[in-house]
Image (cartoon, helix red, strand yellow):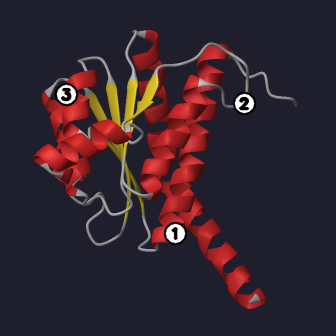
Amino acid sequence: MKTRIAANLVQSTAARQAFAAASTGLIIELAGWIVETFRAGGKLLLFGNGGSAADAQHMAAEFVNRFMIDRRPLPAIALTTDSSVLTSIGNDFGFDLVFVKQVQALGKPGDLALAISTSGRSPNVVRALAAAREMGMRTAALTGGTAKPGGDLGPVADLLLNVPTDSTPHIQETHLWVEHMVCELVEMEMFGDSRPA
């Protein structure tokens, strides 16, 4: 077990390091887009399935409440939380539209849609990001994989951040690191760096 733990830690760290080496500029760009969206009076819509749904909720909470510093709330909405909306859309129209209809109801030009998908192939996530783009929203995606980076989300994402590994756990671990980095960069840009030295 100790050997497995040590090996997993090395692999997880390597996945984050490989992503950071290739995509630091994209992380900064995503943070900049979010800052621009908030400053212009827009909002951030986040969505994904399973662990990615949890990531969407986690990231929205960091913006609405706080990440590292006390500051005014920022408008971020996870489209994964309203059980009545999710189940009514799923029941009446099918699971593929559970995020599309929410994007259409809540989104507007000037907003930013952030899709989170380990594979980049989830039909409901792809369709929602495409709908956001059609509505004039900026679109970004966090994905993973090496065979077809970005999966089906790549063509509908204005900004694609793909973790170059096929290990689902390491993709998800890297996504969480990226999400935290983006929250930190947004707070720093908008409110100053008030972390202890």
How far apart are labels 1 and 2 at the CA level?
25 Å
Q: With respect to residue 33, does 81 lie above or below?
A: below
How far apart are labels 1 and 3 at the CA level?
31 Å
Q: Residues within 10 Å of mark 2 (few under 14, many from 20)?
A: some
Q: Residue at x 15, y 51 (%)?
A: 94
Q: Which residue is mark 2?
A: 68
Q: Secondary structure at mark 1?
A: helix
Q: Secondary structure at mark 2?
A: loop
Q: Label 2 amino acid?
A: Met
Q: Label 3 amino acid?
A: Gln
Q: Residue lying farthest top?
A: 40
Q: Which residue is mark 3?
A: 104
Q: Which residue is mark 1?
A: 169
Of mark 2 and mark 3, the one earlier in the sequence is 2
Q: Residues within 10 Å of mark 3 (few under 14, many from 20)?
A: some
**Foreground: disc 1 or disc 3:** 3
Q: Are marks 1 and 3 in contact (CB under 8 Å)?
A: no
Q: Are marks 1 and 2 in contact (CB under 8 Å)?
A: no
Is residue 37 at least partly visible in the picture?
Answer: yes
In the image, is 179 to the left or to the right of 90?
right
